[in-house]
Structures are given as C-alpha cells and as structure tokens.
Amino acid sequence: MLRLFDGDDGKRLKALAIQFYITCVFSVTDYVFFENSSSNPYLIRRIEELNKTASGNVEAKVVCFYRRRDISHSLIQLADKHAKELEEEKESPTETELTEKQKHQLRHRELFLSRQYESLPATHIRGKCSVALLNETEAVLSYLDKEDTFFYSLVYDPTQKTLLADKGEIRVGPRFQADVPEMLQEGEADDRDQSKLEEKLWDPECPLTNKQIDQFLVVARAVGTFARALDCSSSVRQPSLHMSAAAASRDITLFHAMDTLHRHNYDLSSALSVLVPAGGPVLCRDEMEEWSASEAAMFEEALEKYGKDFNDIRQDFLPWKSLTSIIEYYYMWKTTDRYVQQKRLKAAEAESKLKQVYIPTYNKPNPNQISMTNGKMATVNGAGPGAFHAAGGGRACESCYIPHIFIFILNWIWLLLNIINGLNLGRFVHGQSFLRCLNHLG
C-alpha cells in the first residue's frame, strides 16, 4: 500500500524533490556550465533551445559567454579601462576599498556576452550558474558572496574582435516624450510662434459632417481602383478587381484623401478635382505594394536570420532599399495573413520543442583535479608533484600557474647562491629549488 508522506517526512521529500529539480533538470533560458575539455575551465552558456536529434540525443542551442582568458590582451585592457570609467562615474566608489584578492576574484567572475550561437550535446552540461548584467547601483562584493554567480557589461564579437557596451536605457525624459504645456484658459491667446510648432494635418472641427467625409473617402478608393486598372505594373501585381480594390483601400489612399481635403480647406469640389487631375487619376502606393514578390521573400529570409536587426537586413539582403523603407514594410507585413500564419506555425513548432531536459549528476573523476593521496598532493596544476606544466595546459586552477621563465630564473638564483656559499649542489628539481629560493629570499 502507498501512504502519503506528512510531517517531517513530507518536508524532507519535498526538499529532495526541489534539490533534484535544481541540480538535474535544465530548462530553456537557464545559465549552465558546459565541459568541453577536462583540462579547461567550464564554458558558460545560456540555453536558447533544446532539440532532439535523429539519433535520439538532445542538443542545446546556446548563447556563448566568454571569460577574460578567451579574449586578447588588448581587449582586456579596453575592458579594464571601461570598468575604471564606470567606477569613476559612481558617487561612492567601492573598487578602491577592495583588497587585491577580491579584485582578482572579481576578474574571474567577469564574462563577456556575445551574439554567437553554437550547438552542444546536453550531456556535457555540468551544472547551473547565474549570469547578470552588471548593476552599477549594487555593491560589487555581492557577486563574490553568491556561489556560481557571474556578471557582464560588455559584448564581445569573436569575428570582429571588438568589445561594445551592453547598457540598457529607459526611454523617459524630454528626449523621448513631448513636454505638454498647460491648457489655455477660455479666451486666452496663444503667444507661441506657430511656425516653430507641429504642422496641423487635420482639423476635427472642420465644417464637413462625418457622412460627407466618408463619401469623399469612398470616392478616393474608387479613384485608386481605377488608377490601378490603368497602370500596367499594378495589373500584374493585382490581376483581379477584388485585389485592386483591396489595395486601393489601404491607409496610404485614405491619408492622401484626408490630406487633400485639409489642404483645400475642406472644399469638396476643389479636393475632388485634385484627386483626378488632367493627367489621369492619382495612384498612391505604400511599401507593401511597391515591393516585388522576390523582395518580399528575401525580406522574410533575412528576418528569419537576423530578427529585427534592420541594418544587417539592409546590408546583406536588400542594399537597394532605404532603412526607412524596410522598417515601414516590416510593420505593414505584420498586418498580413502571411505573418499570422507564420506566427501560428512558429508557436506550434515552439510548443513541440523540448522545454527541459534531465541530466544526471556527473560523478566521473577529473584527471586534472587536485587531490590528496596518503596525505600527499597527487596532482599539482595538472601534473605530478614538482613537475613543470606549460602555460595554458592542464591547470586545475587559473591562478596557481607560475610562468616557466620565473621558475627558470629562481633555479639560477639558487644555483648562484650555492656556488657563492660553496654548498653541495646535488640534484635539482623545479619544485624543490623553487621552495628553497622562496625560503632563502623570504
């Protein structure tokens, strides 16, 4: 028989379930550690998608974060300069209060975001971590107080080898919102220079009734439909009367009609004569109508690749189009049935994708891990006791590496000291001579 857990047993079971979920279940948008080599630090990535391959394995599409060790020395100097400028902008600087050890630890908590994606086997996930955009109002020590917590403030482009600031901006203020003046009192004159103000495009208190305005707009649509029937290129794009009438009813036609009314002081006869001048009826087209089918297909392909990065879309796919034209077309394209269909397909595809994956806890020993055997250190920097290990290879700790040239110099110092003091040299081992030099010089 099954019995329900209650009291301490129930709490313990719940705690175990939560711990299991935290440590073994990985979801989309989680920040995780990936192991690509037993001798290198874990990669830090953010899971964007979880996809099942044909062989049944799970691959994770991830966003790459880079450590300081992964970028060039010149870019490291640029990052340090940026951090110094941020510190100088603060009202109460805290960096100067940090010890050298804390500064060193913070450098190893700093990451660099990239726009680069890669696919990695989900079985290489080794745990979760936390990554946040650097909060200038928060004490930097807070990142050291939390385990497996990292921060970033710069974006690294591995192709161009550049660093850029990734700073969000709240668009509030006079640069983004208009300053609305106080409402004028009844009979109070407006002293502002009208030439410096906005241009009025429509007067809601015009002498025409709503019915007269609607009738004028119907005439404008009819003129637009007739103009498309006379235009050869339009007859190719809209081969049927129904399609021509639909195109003539778009906003560009209505805006032109209302603007014509306003410019002619809401005189219907005068405005009608402008709609049909001597050269033929006026044809108004927007970006949706101007673009060809091949251009529309290229735009959708570019949008799938770059998202709403219109500069890249223009540069790589539609260089003959202006940026204004591309942006205007995008917002018109979002009103079409094709966009609605694509949105539904993407939603269905996203629904069918994996949301999370279970990865058992990784318990295999790391050959480069520092361990103790019978009270003696078994591995030092990925090598045996006293053995030299080349820079960048097999170090279990990024900070405990001593450059080869430094050990070489210390060996020579110890050799000279022995010669000067007439000591018996014996056989030298890097680790032993290094410790002797430190003890002698200290």
Image (spheres, helix red, strand yellow):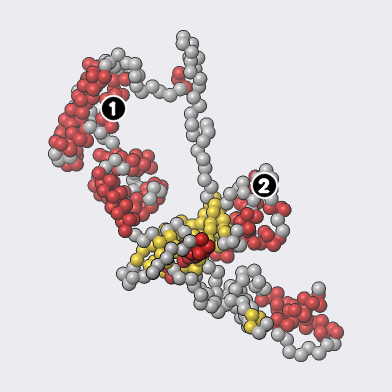
Looking at the image, is mark 1 or mark 2 earlier in the sequence?
2
Amino acid under label 2? Glu
Q: Nearer the viewer, residue 52 or 266?
A: 52
Give the side of residue 145 with respect to residue 24, left or right.
right
Picture coordinates of residue 325, whole percent (x, y): 34, 40
Q: Picture coordinates of residue 415 (x, y %)? A: 78, 83
Q: Decide: is 408 above or below 15.
A: below
Marks 1 and 2 sit apart, C-alpha to C-alpha, by: 54 Å
Q: Is residue 315 visible?
A: no
In the rendered image, the residue lying farthest to the right is 421
Q: Residues within 10 Å of mark 1 (few under 14, many from 20)?
A: some
Looking at the image, which residue is at 85% across and 87% down?
Answer: 422
Look at the numbered discs 1 and 2 and tell me whether their residues touch, using CB distance below 8 Å. Answer: no
The residue wearing badge 2 is: 88
The amino acid sitting under disc 1 is: His
Query: Residue shown at 27%/28% (left/top)?
Result: 254
Q: Is residue 308 left or right of residue 6?
A: left
Q: Nearer the viewer, residue 352 or 320?
A: 352
Residue 92 drawn at (x, y percent): 69, 45
- Give the structural element (helix, strand or loop) at label 2: helix
Residue 437 in picture, x, y percent from top left: 77, 78
Instruction: Name the residue carrying label 1.
Output: 256
Q: Callout 2: few (<14), some (14-19), or many (20+) C-alpha neighbours within 10 Å?
A: few
Please tell me whether mark 1 or mark 2 is closer to you in this view: 2
Q: Residue furthest left?
A: 240
Residue 209 located left or right of residue 100? left
Compared with 266, 374 (above or below) is: below
Residue 392 appearing in the image: yes
